[in-house]
Image (cartoon, rainbow, N blue to C red):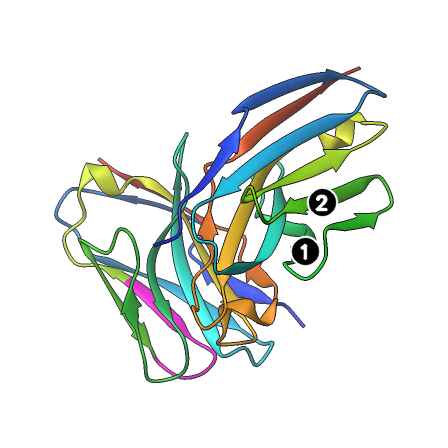
Amino acid sequence: NAGVTQTPKFQVLKTGQSMTLQCAQDMNHNSMYWYRQDPGMGLRLIYYSASEGTTDKGEVPNGYNVSRLNKREFSLRLESAAPSQTSVYFCASREGAGGGSGNTIYFGEGSWLTVV
Amino acid sequence: GENVEQHPSTLSVQEGDSAVIKCTYSDSASNYFPWYKQELGKRPQLIIDIRSNVGEKKDQRIAVTLNKTAKHFSLHITETQPEDSAVYFCAASTYGNNRLAFGKGNQVVVIP
């Protein structure tokens, strides 16, 4: 049981390049999330998927797209990378679809992305 | 939407002393309040959580208290140890809302 697995762990991109961050969970969770973490800014939600087949914008969705490929996988795509997207990206998953259910959010190990 | 704020942003304590981090939230309908610990270079991990139907919860050296009237909740760490040095995030969630709103984090430094 690996939990939440995301790849790649490290990536350097040139401005304007595109890339996809992959995420998979093996806990049969319904909800999946992508966060970015920047110094002093905490964890900011980019996009989330409450269940297979649905996706919704979070706080900072501009410049990103997502795909909930199936129940296990939720990918994040940068179509044209910008230096402002230099950050640590965390994928996460949660069993329930209701916020008050109290289900724990489990995070992946993070992906360090630098855009030059 | 929900707004969660944490204070202080950085806290330094002597080993063995207690540390308290306070979070305030804006949405009175929020009913689930977890705390996450993030060590340097690692992922955030849940350390304790509380629901709105209880006022306090303990787990060994850590505890969380909730004041629904004042809309704040606090993390208490007793007998601090060097391994408690980390960034701590609080969060709040409302029933029916699939999103957790995170605070910006508190850096706790335990001085040996």
| Residue B58 coordinates in the image, percent (x, y) | 81, 48
Residue ID at (33%, 84%): A53
Indicate yes or no whether the magenta region holds residue A74: yes
**Disc 2 marks which residue?**
B64
**Which residue is outermost to the front?**
B69
Query: Does A103 appear above or below B91?
Result: below
| Residue A51 coordinates in the image, percent (x, y) | 41, 81
Residue A70 or residue A15, whichever sits in front: A70
Whole-number angstrom distance, CA of label 2 to CA of label 1:
7 Å
Residue B12 picture quarter: top right
Question: Which chain is indicated by disc 1?
Answer: B
Q: How many marks?
A: 2
Residue A56 or residue B28, whichever sits in front: B28
Residue B50 got which mark? Answer: 1
| Residue B47 coordinates in the image, percent (x, y) | 70, 49
Q: At numbered mark 2, what does the secondary structure look like: helix, strand or loop?
A: strand
Residue ID at (58%, 27%): B107
Residue A39 picture quarter: top left
Magenta region, main secondary structure? loop
Residue A26 or residue B68, whichever sits in front: B68
Q: At numbered mark 1, what does the secondary structure look like: helix, strand or loop?
A: strand
